[in-house]
Structures are given as C-alpha cells and as structure tokens.
Amino acid sequence: MNSKNIVKDNKGLTLIELLVSSAILLLIITAFLSMLASAAKMFAKGSRDLDVQEEAQIVTNQVEALLTDCEVYAGQVGNSIYIVNKDVVNVVSEESDGVFLSTFNNALDEEDNTAANVKALLASNPNSIKGGSTGRALLSNRALGLSLNTDKLESDNVVYLTANYKNLDREVGVNQSIFLRNKPGTSISGGDTNPIENDYDAELLVLRYKSYNLKTLFGISTVTGKTGADANCYEVSEIGILKIKDTVSTSASSAGGCIVKCVKGGAEYKIRLSFDAVAVGLGNGESQVTVVRLQDVEQVCDYVSIKGFDTHSSDVKYTINMRVGQNLTSGFIEKKSGDKISLTGGSGTKIDALEGDINVGSKTFKGVFRFCLDDRSTHLIFRQTGQSTEQGKGLVALYTIDVYYKNTYLGTAKINVRYPN
C-alpha cells in the first residue's frame, strides 16, 4: 500500500458536520436544563406552600395555648392581643416586621387584677397593665393579619382567633374557636361548670377515649374522692386510673367543675379536671376551598382541626370519601365517585399505616393522613398528591372526612380542592 492511498482513506469530519452535531447537542442540553429548571420551580413552589401552612399552624397553636390557660382576661387593642394572667401579661402584637410575643410582669395589685378592671384598662390605658419586660420573641414574619373576637367571651367563654399568612403567591387563612377553660372575664359566683374549689395542686385536660394513670402523672399514692358539679362525668378508680365516661355527651364540656382528692406523700393533693366538647372541622367547621394551579403544584395540604378526644385511640376511625365534579350555579355536579377508605389510629401506629389511595376514573389521588397531637389540640394533616382527571373544566375534588368512635358519629370535615378553568 503506497502513501497516496493512506492519505485518501484517512477521512475526517467536515465543518458542516461539526456544526450540525454541535447544534443537536445544544438542543439536547437546552431541553434538559429547561426540564431541570421546571422541576426545581415545582419543588420550590411546593416547599413554599408547605412552609407557610406549617408556620401558620405552629403560630396558631402557640397563641391558642396561651389563650386556653388565660386566667384573668383576654382582649385586643389595635393590632395587639392581650392575654392577662395573675402574674404575667402576654402580648401578641402585629408589627411592620412580623408578629411578636412580648411578656411582661403583671403590674396590677391583687385587688385590681379583676376581669372587669382589666377590661376597662385595655380600653383606656393598656400600658398600665404591663410591668417590667421579661421576654420578646418573633412568632412569624409572614402574617398579614391577626385578630381576636371576644364577643362570646363572657357568655360562652369562647374567643375566635383569625390570622392570615402569605409566602410569595401562597396565602393561608386560619380561623380557630378557642375555649378558655379557666373562665376569665366571667363571674365565679355560680354555674354548673365552675370549680367547686379554687385551691388545687395540679390540673389536667382530659381527652375522651383515653385513660390516665394519676400515679404516674402526679406521683399520688391513692384517690380518696371527687367533688364538683361535673364529678359524675369522670371515672376515677382508687388506684388512680382516670377517664371520661362514655355516657357523657360529645357536645358537653367542662371548665373544671371537678376536683379529684388524692394522697401524695401523706398529705392531701387536689387535681382539677376539665375537658373540651368534641369538635371536628376546618377552623370553625366551615368547608375550606383551596385553589390549585395545575401547572405549578401537584400537592394539596390542609389541617383538619380535631378537639376533645384522643386521635390515637384504636376505636377512632376516619372514613374518607372523594367525589369529582364541577361547581356550577346549579350546585355541585358529580362526574365520578371515588373509593372510600378507612383509617384507624392506635398505639404504635406508623405513618405508612395511615395512608390510602382513592381511585377516581383512570387517575389515582394519593392521600397521606398524619396525626399530630399535643397537650391541648389535635390536628389531622391531610395531604393529596395528584392532579385532576379533566383539566381546564373547573374540576372540583370534594373530600368528606367522617370521624367515628366505634359506632358513635363525632363529626365531619370537608376539603374542597378547586382546579380553575
């Protein structure tokens, strides 16, 4: 083989071939980067939605805990909510850079520290209630509004907390009814729910369908008796096992009309008991509408408010049903019905045991149901992952969550997920 043949057979890429290959590669890289950017945008949007909802619920729980234990009076002046106790004044204030919790010593003498006097001072000179500052903390920098309605405080011992939060384009509103168990702002001269004795060593908010061991909780040795207008609502054994009787109406509540007398360390020990009425719903029980833009998010998260009973009880059942349809002027037009699923809590229940799929048509809507329990309030976190079966037609996914204890109906919460046209 001569050298001329070698040169002729050694072919390379032409300039045109190189340019075409580079253009194709550039298109592939551009498409990949576009998909990556879109996925990052969806992830960031979903994270923002969850962040603002979780923050809203955390702040609401903090303020609710302060209001629940309020001893003297609760009211609002301007953009500030005052929660007045015997020794401490908590002020939740909405300011330009966020919502803050400030704590002060109560500046009033014991004889002036009455509900009527504090109410008058809040209207005329709220600063006269506040003594030296003992702390200040930021609760939220995403709050748009915070208000406390006390119209039912003196008659029903209930206040209504309203708050709005926003994180970029996601806005969340929270409406919470709160029962003030110490009955501040009302007379203690009468009433079936008033405690028969004001001096006690400890107190306990009792949930339905849950047993308490007073020996373990308070270190008592024995129970000697119980007194008060609500004493017949509780079962208490001599060895200290306590629970609410099943015969007590789920609508009944107690502000502490029962004192359990015990022995601890050879001396008398008193425990004041109280319980809330059963409540299931969103905020004040209304249906909540969540608007979802399909191109931006595939996840919906809501908090179902549950009070008065132990959500972890193995006898408590949650039945979830989903219907798909359209909201028209003539009402909800059902197009498809979903499979009903039942979820039951219980001691040791894992999160993955509280999940279920609801099938509607050719699509599967994933529901993740999680229990979150603290000392005073319970919330069922509802999370849906998935999109509508018919986009662009004003589709509505209507979830109905019915709650039962054995065969006793406790309440219903409705979540209305609306997909815009």
Image (spheres, rainbow, N blue to C red):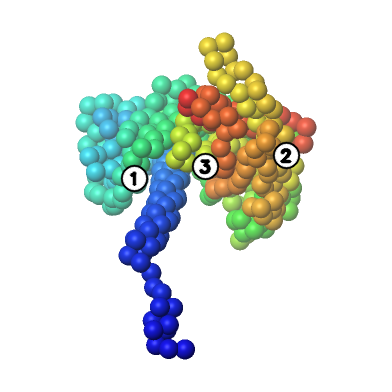
Q: Is residue 273 shown to the viewer in this render?
A: no
Where 207 sits versus 190, above or below?
below
For image coordinates 34% across by 45% down, the residue present is: 140
- Disc 2 or 1, which lies upstream in sequence? 1
- Outermost right residue: 407
Mark 3, secondary structure of its residue: strand
Chain-order first, disc 1 or disc 3: 1
> Which mark is drawn over residue 55?
none
Q: Which mark is residue 299?
A: 3
Q: Local crowd at mark 1 within 10 Å, few (<14), some, or many (≥20)?
A: some
Label 1's element? strand
Q: Position of residue 125 (x, y in %)?
A: 21, 31
Question: For numbered disc 2, what is the local secondary structure?
Answer: strand
| Label 3 – label 2 distance at C-alpha | 21 Å
Q: Is residue 44 left or right of residue 253?
A: left
Q: Dot 2 corresponds to which residue?
A: 342
The residue where tag 1 is placed is 140
Residue visible at 67% across and 36% down? Answer: 362
**Image location of residue 252, percent across then percent down:** 63, 28
- As rendered, which of 29 and 367 lies closer to the eye? 29
- Determine the image quadrant of residue 59: top left
